[in-house]
Image (cartoon, grey):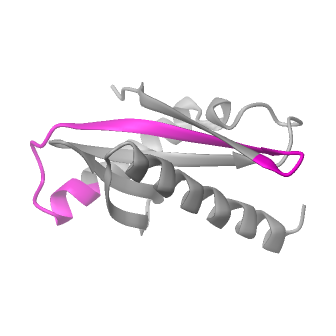
Amino acid sequence: MTTDARQILGQTGESLACAELERRGYAILARRFRTRTGEIDIVARDRDTVVFVEVKARAGTGYGDGAEAVTGWKQRRLAMVALEFLARHRLVGSPCRFDVVSIAFRDGQSTVEVYANAFGVA
């Protein structure tokens, strides 16, 4: 898959993830929050909880489910970026969690799965 196709797949996946999260009552606070350390795809609020969302979109099953791609290394990196978001927005001390949205595109259809509280970071 070319870089352009991957970027389009990722952007489409993020848009579908936002739509699903909003359908579930989340308020989207930011998309593609970037720091030197990395990027968080979506930052949302679910009631009083700040939710950091990693979106994984897959065009096929060759690399497994998208949620499986959020390794321990990736989780630690997301946690560092999340701490910076909380500090920049004066939300330190707010309840927060990490969700993963996995999107599979197959046969012209998309399947969106939300894994709330997908992982905790030590």
- The answer to whether one can see residue 55 in this image is yes
Question: Depth check: 64 or 75 in front?
Answer: 64
Identify the residue shown where x is 14% and y is 42%: 48
In the rendered view, does 19 fall on the left or right side of 69? left
Q: Is residue 35 visible?
A: no
Can residue 47 be found in the magenta stretch? no
| In the image, farthest residue toward the bottom | 4
Task: Find residue 42 and report its image quarter.
Answer: bottom left
Q: Is residue 86 left or right of residue 14?
A: left
94 drawn magenta: yes
Percent across and percent down for residue 39 are: 47, 60
In the rendered image, the quadrant that contains the N terminus is: bottom right
From the top left corner, tell me how far across and down residue 22 is, in percent: 39, 52
Q: Quadrant of the C terminus?
A: top left
Please tell me which residue lies in front, 22 or 59.
Answer: 22
Q: Residue 82: x and y, percent?
A: 32, 50
Residue bounds of the magenta highlight:
84-109
Closest to the observer, 85 or 49: 49
- All told, the count of numbered labels is 0
Residue plotted at (32% across, 46% down): 25
Q: Vertical placement of 115 versus 31: above or below?
A: above
Coordinates of residue 43 in the picture (x, y in percent): 35, 55
